[in-house]
Amino acid sequence: MKNRIFHSIYTKFLVTFLGALFFSSTLTFGVVYWSQLGSILDQIRVELVNQAQAVQTLNREQLSDEAITGLYTQGIVVSRIVASLDEVGAVLSEEERAKLEQGEIVYLVAYQSHDLPMALGKLTDGYVVTMPNLEKNQIVGFMNLQRTTMLVTLLIGSVLMGHAMS
């Protein structure tokens, strides 16, 4: 009985169809991932730098640190103000430190053990640290959307295949 199931045309067709569906979904997942991830990272970089610049501007306008950080704690990018770079935990080169002291924004792709980008800026009496909001992380959302799309495609294909064969 078992031998008949594995050698039936239905089983061979089902395995071939699901294999082709899985392969094409995986290939599509990879292509979309590699083609869109750079764009998403560029958008995050722009958001981080823009928000750090906005905090610098508000700091020059004599707005309190609490008021400034209160404005930037709920979005996809969050900012906090620290008194020294030691509180940040990022290792900066001499060139990056010089840029910070000149008032420029320094963008770090990843720091320490975290794989998150960060933007740093000098304020009158401290530094602004701008990072992606982990509760609203765009990269994780993008990956989850791709994974869900692939699984739904496989599920629909399996249901249609099972319905067509019965």
Image (spheres, rainbow, N blue to C red):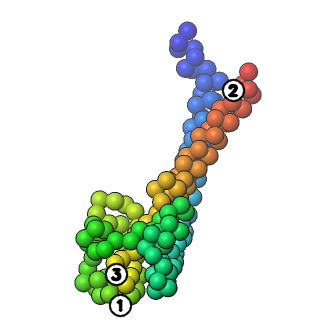
Query: Which is more toward the observer, 23 or 126?
Result: 126
* Label 3, residues with CA under 10 Å away: few <14, some 14-19, many ≥20: few
- Of callouts 1 and 3, the N-terminal one: 1
* Residue type beneath disc 2: Gly
Q: Is disc 3 in contact with disc 2, using a CB cutoff of under 8 Å?
A: no
Residue for badge 1 = 102
* Label 2, residues with CA under 10 Å away: few <14, some 14-19, many ≥20: few
The spot of residue 102 in percent (x, y) is: 35, 90
In the rendered image, the quadrant that contains the N terminus is top right
Q: CA distance from mark 3 to mark 2?
A: 67 Å
Q: CA distance from mark 1 to mark 3?
A: 14 Å
The spot of residue 73 in percent (x, y) is: 50, 63
Residue for badge 3 = 125
Residue for badge 2 = 162
Residue at 57 percent across and 14 percent down: it is 4
Instruction: Indicate left or right for 83 with 21 as reference.
Output: left
* Residue type beneath disc 3: Asp
Which residue occupies the extreme top position in the image?
1
